[in-house]
Image (spheres, helix red, strand yellow):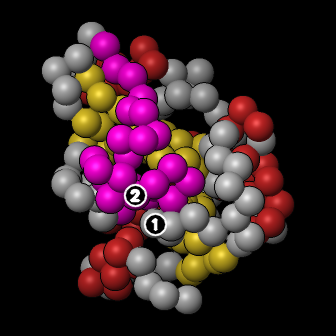
C-alpha cells in the first residue's frame, strides 16, 4: 500500500497505527449505511468507525469534527464548541480545495491547513478506532489518545 500524507505524518510523530484496505464502492452517504458497510468490510464494530466532518461558520472559519460514524452531529453542540452562531457542513465539491481530501477519503490528519479540530468524547471508550486513511478504500486504525495528539483536538460531547 502506498503511504498517504496522513500515514507519513503519523510516522513522523512516531505514532503507531495499522492500515486496512477495503473495496470502495463509491457509496459514502451515511444515510445509506456507509459506516455500517465499511465496518463489515473491515471486520470491526460500527461504533469504532469515526467519520470526519468539515464545517464552516458564519465568519467563514473552517472547523473539523470527528465522531462515531453511526451517530449524527449535534449542530448546537458544534456551535457551542466553536463559539459561533451558525455552522454548516462544507459542500463535498469544496473538500478537496479546502482540505486536500475528497469525500470518503477525508481524514482529520494532515489537511492543507491546520484547522481547529473537535473529536466526540465517545472515542475514549475504544481501544482503537478507524478513521479514513486519506484516500477512499483505506482506513487507519489508531488509539484514541494518539489521534487526539496527532490532530491537537479538543474532546467533547458532539452527538445528538
Say if 5 sits above or below 112 in the image: below
Q: Which dot marks residue 10? A: none
On whether residue 91 falls in the magenta region, the answer is yes
Mark 2 and mark 1 in contact? Answer it, CB < 8 Å: yes
Q: What is the x, y in percent for residue 43?
A: 81, 68
Residue shown at 38% from the left, 33% from the top: 90
Residue at the front extreme?
A: 93
**Label 2 or label 1, whichever comes before in sequence order:** 2
Residue 123 appears in view? no
Question: Which residue, given by chain and number where applicable, does mark 2 sit on?
Answer: 101
Which residues fall within the magenta stretch?
Answer: 86-109
Question: Which residue, given by chain and number where applicable, does mark 1 sit on?
Answer: 134
Residue shown at 71% from the left, 72% from the top: 22
Quadrant housing the C terminus:
top right
Helix, strand or loop status at disc 1: loop
Viewer-proximal residue, 139 or 157?
Answer: 139
Q: What is the x, y in percent for residue 30?
A: 68, 38
Viewer-proximal residue, 101 or 128?
Answer: 101
Residue shown at 40% from the left, 58% from the top: 101
Residue at the top extreme?
A: 85
Quadrant housing the N terminus:
bottom right
Residue 101 appears in view? yes
Distance from disc 2 to disc 1, alpha carbons, whole Å, reads 6 Å
Residue shown at 46% from the left, 66% from the top: 134
Amino acid at each position: 500500500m502506498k503511504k498517504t500524507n496522513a500515514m507519513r505524518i503519523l510516522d513522523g510523530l512516531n505514532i503507531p497505527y495499522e492500515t486496512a484496505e477495503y473495496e470502495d464502492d463509491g457509496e459514502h452517504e451515511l444515510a445509506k449505511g456507509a459506516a455500517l458497510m465499511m465496518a463489515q468490510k473491515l471486520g470491526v464494530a460500527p461504533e469504532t468507525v469515526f467519520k470526519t466532518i468539515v464545517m464552516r461558520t458564519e465568519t467563514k472559519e473552517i472547523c473539523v469534527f470527528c465522531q462515531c460514524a453511526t451517530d449524527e452531529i449535534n449542530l448546537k453542540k458544534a456551535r457551542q464548541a466553536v463559539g459561533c452562531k451558525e455552522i454548516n457542513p462544507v459542500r463535498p465539491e469544496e473538500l478537496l480545495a479546502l482540505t486536500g481530501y475528497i469525500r470518503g477519503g477525508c481524514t482529520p490528519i494532515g489537511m492543507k491547513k491546520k484547522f481547529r479540530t473537535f473529536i466526540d468524547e465517545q472515542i475514549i471508550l475504544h481501544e482503537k478506532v478507524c478513521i479514513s486513511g486519506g484516500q477512499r478504500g483505506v482506513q487507519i486504525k489508531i488509539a484514541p489518545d494518539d489521534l487526539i495528539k496527532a490532530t491537537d483536538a479538543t474532546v467533547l460531547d458532539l452527538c445528538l
